[in-house]
């Protein structure tokens, strides 16, 4: 009886929580958090579909470049994290405990990097420049990690793994924010979802290939494989055209024509993009 009563109480709590979610929590806040969101609420057509949003995103050349470069960076991080124990044990026999600690260092440094890079991006609004710099520093970190493994000094590997984790994980929020900027007014959930999907695809492919290279030859060959791909990602990132569409809407108060219909929307061909009367200096990212 006691057990049945406890189960009934749990079910009642779950029912109450569900009711709160559907009745108390609103679909959106009473006031939009930004001017860009306010424009979307007023201008987005009701018959605009998820399928149309994906089609528009894949017609955006800058977003395609970002998706590939983001997938390369994140996939490389996933691959290194997955094969880290195998890599460390190859160079340092019977150091399973320290292999785990190096992995912890990678994660903790990444947490710090994500916060710092996010704050920096929010402060400067230099999306492409920050993305490119962090990408280059991640490449340098990967080179350092690759060629210090054979030195025989664990403390050096701890340091280089921390540097690698700091910049590789720090790139993740930057990539998401950059994607939202260059795809506005498309849904943030759609662009972020595609970025994450490609990250998983590249992660699986890189893990399989690097694992095979490390087993057949050595971890050095597998790490060099990732270094080559990260360098390719740097080139792709440099080719991205930085149009800060969402940021332009937020800063151009008083100069904004309230039309934020996604490109090639079937319901409004004439309003194919955000129309701004901002000064030309605002249309593209400025340098530091």
Image (cartoon, helix red, strand yellow):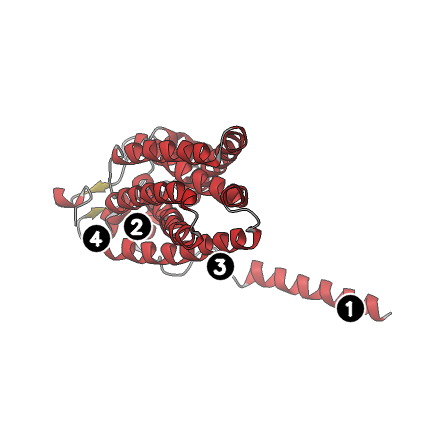
Identify residue for label 3. Answer: 26
Q: Label 4: how many residues lie within 10 Å, few (<14), some (14-19) or many (20+)?
A: some
Q: Residue at 35% of width from left, 49% of height from top?
A: 167
Distance from the alpha carbon under mark 4 to that under mark 3? 27 Å
- Where residue 68 sits: x, y (%)? 38, 33
Distance from the alpha carbon under mark 2 to that under mark 1? 48 Å
In front of the other: label 4 or label 3? 4
- Where residue 142 sits: x, y (%)? 37, 42
Q: Residue at 50% of width from left, 38% of height from top?
A: 200
Residue 270 horizontal side relative to residue 214, left or right: left
Contact check, label 4 and label 3, Cβ < 8 Å: no
Distance from the alpha carbon under mark 2 to that under mark 4? 9 Å
Distance from the alpha carbon under mark 4 to that under mark 1? 55 Å
Q: Earlier in the sequence, mark 3 or mark 1?
A: 1
Q: Label 3: how many residues lie within 10 Å, few (<14), some (14-19) or many (20+)?
A: few
Q: Secondary structure at mark 2?
A: helix
| Tag count | 4
Contact check, label 4 and label 1, Cβ < 8 Å: no
On residue 251, the disc is: 4
In front of the other: label 2 or label 3? 2
């Amino acid at each position: 009886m006691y057990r049945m009563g406890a189960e009934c109480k749990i079910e009642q709590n779950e029912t109450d929580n569900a009711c709160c979610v559907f009745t108390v929590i609103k679909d959106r806040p009473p006031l939009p958090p930004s001017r860009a969101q306010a424009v979307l609420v007023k201008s987005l057509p009701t018959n605009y579909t998820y399928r149309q949003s994906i089609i528009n995103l894949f017609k955006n050349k800058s977003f395609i470049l970002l998706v590939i470069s983001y997938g390369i960076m994140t996939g490389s991080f996933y691959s290194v994290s997955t094969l880290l124990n195998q890599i460390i044990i190859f160079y340092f026999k019977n150091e399973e405990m320290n292999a785990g600690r190096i992995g912890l260092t990678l994660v903790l440094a990444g947490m710090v990097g994500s916060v710092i890079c996010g704050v920096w991006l929010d402060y400067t609004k230099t999306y492409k420049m920050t993305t490119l710099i962090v990408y280059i520093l991640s490449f340098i970190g990967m080179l350092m990690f690759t060629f210090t493994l054979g030195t025989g000094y664990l403390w050096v590997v701890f340091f280089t793994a921390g540097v690698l984790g700091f910049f590789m994980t720090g790139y993740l929020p930057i990539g998401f924010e950059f994607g939202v900027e260059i795809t506005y007014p498309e849904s943030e959930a759609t662009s972020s979802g595609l970025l994450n999907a490609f990250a998983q695809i590249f992660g699986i492919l890189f893990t399989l290939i690097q694992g095979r290279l490390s087993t057949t030859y050595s971890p050095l060959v597998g790490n060099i494989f990732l270094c080559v791909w990260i360098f390719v990602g740097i080139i792709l990132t440099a080719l991205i055209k930085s149009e800060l569409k969402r940021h332009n809407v937020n800063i151009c108060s008083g100069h904004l024509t309230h039309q934020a219909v996604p490109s090639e929307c079937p319901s409004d061909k004439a309003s194919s993009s955000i129309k701004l009367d901002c000064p030309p200096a605002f249309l593209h990212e400025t340098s530091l």
